[in-house]
Amino acid sequence: MQVALDFIDLHRAVKVAEEAISGGADWLEIGTPLIKSEGMNAVRHMRKLFPGVTLLADMKTMDAGRMEMEMAAKAGANIAVVMGEAPDSTIKECIQAGKNYGIKICVDFINNGKVEERIADIEKWGADYISVHTAIDDQMCGMTPFDTLKCVCSKIKAPVSVAGGINSENVVDAVNAGASIVIVGGYITKSKDAKIAAESIKTAIRENKRVDTALFKRVTTEGVREALSRLSTANISDAGHRAEGITGLYPIYQNMKLVGKAVTVRTFPGDWAKPVEAIDIAKEGDVIVIDAGGVGPAIWGELATHSALQKKISGVVIHGAIRDISEIRKLNFPAFVKMVMPTAGEPKGLGEINIPVQVSGIRINPGDWIVGDDDGLMVIPMSEADVRVNYGMDCLERENRIRQEILSEKSSLGKVIDVLKWEKR
């Protein structure tokens, strides 16, 4: 088991490394972000702290193979990485340099469609390891390395490592596909307790049995709702590169969570006919999103809420007015609204259902995912849902680890993430 220490701060990488080794990790990978952040000093420091542990420097070399392999070897690495997409001359030079400087060479195939064509030659040239690797950003799109892994393992004799979203559930798939080395990243490095996480991987391998995990796995379309139930709107915003949410609407009670696909309604101020009709159109778990111009009179109340509950609708978002909120609160029905007033409008029947609407500059299409909590409302386009959710889960997992480091070290956020070091100069 190789643990990928993909940090940008050395002190955080060291803490996880210590926990992981105590949990049974065999190799430590000084990840590319750590090498870019700290240089070869990261390798030197890890060698000093862990003199008997195999260290892999994930150089991701694409050129200057001799120089970079020499750097890694002299810093104390046992293994260094050259990319499978590097020129043949660079890969050969890395292998020769490895023999000269006493370091083993791993050729990493990440997003390389020609892996099956190249591995036989690369093995013949003398590479020590071949790595099958699904990139983090590809993992967010639901991609896995297992099909390619199985094919590669059937064609070469060299040891094959695998990376790409390995956790305690799918590590069995990696081993059964023929992997000699399993590379585990986020499942360990973002865990609250890296020792326990490492132990669970070891248990799964030893017993050839899946160990259930709630986090550290990526979803496809079918898993979006369940994942969204775990995420905050802040996680979703972070996942979208500080994406903006709907502003000016507020929950009618605290500790509210709203998740569902949008059934959109555009209606005239005070005309509650189309909102009521939308209840009959909506499916279980949907959210009705109503644009009533941001003004009164009220177009939703207690009776509409009872009707929505009968259909098991998840909630309502109203760019307009609501009434009967005391009764709606007692029913625990999630509602985000612009304003509250006692006056109701009339059912005139003007407007449309399931057409694009805009609230506070955010476009909402029918079927888009709506997520609401005490921080506000986020809209996730249906076409991007699985990717945005997976990045959101990544944010949640990272925060869980940072929170635990703050609490266990009785430290501060600034010290844990080295904020002074990373301030823009």
Image: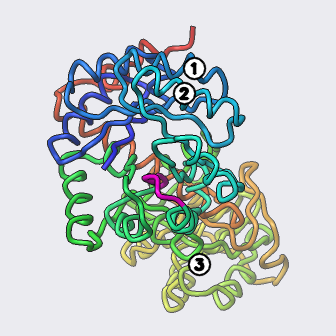
Q: Which residue is mark 1?
A: 66
- Distance CA(mark 2)–CA(mark 3): 61 Å
> Considering the numbered disc 3 on the image, is that residue within a helix, a strand or a loop?
loop
Q: Which mark is residue 54?
A: none
| Mark closer to the observer (3, 1) | 1
- Image quarter (top left, top right, bottom left or bottom right) of the C terminus: top right
Instruction: Give the colour scheme of this rendering.
Output: rainbow
Between 257 and 230, the one lying in front of the other is 230
106 left or right, relative to 52: right
At label 1, the amino acid type is Arg
What residue does disc 3 label? 286
Q: Crowding near pointer 2: few (<14 within 10 Å), some, many (20+)?
A: many
Q: Are marks 2 and 1 in contact (CB under 8 Å)?
A: yes
Q: Which residues are magenta?
A: 156-164
Q: Quadrant of residue 370?
A: bottom right
x 52%, y 29%: residue: 59
Which of discs 2 and 3 lies nearer the camera? The answer is: 2
Of the numbered discs in the image, which one, if any, rests on residue 96?
A: 2
Q: In the rendered structure, which disc, 3 or 1, sits on the residue that comes first in sequence?
A: 1
The image shows residue 323, relative to residue 88, as above or below, that is: below
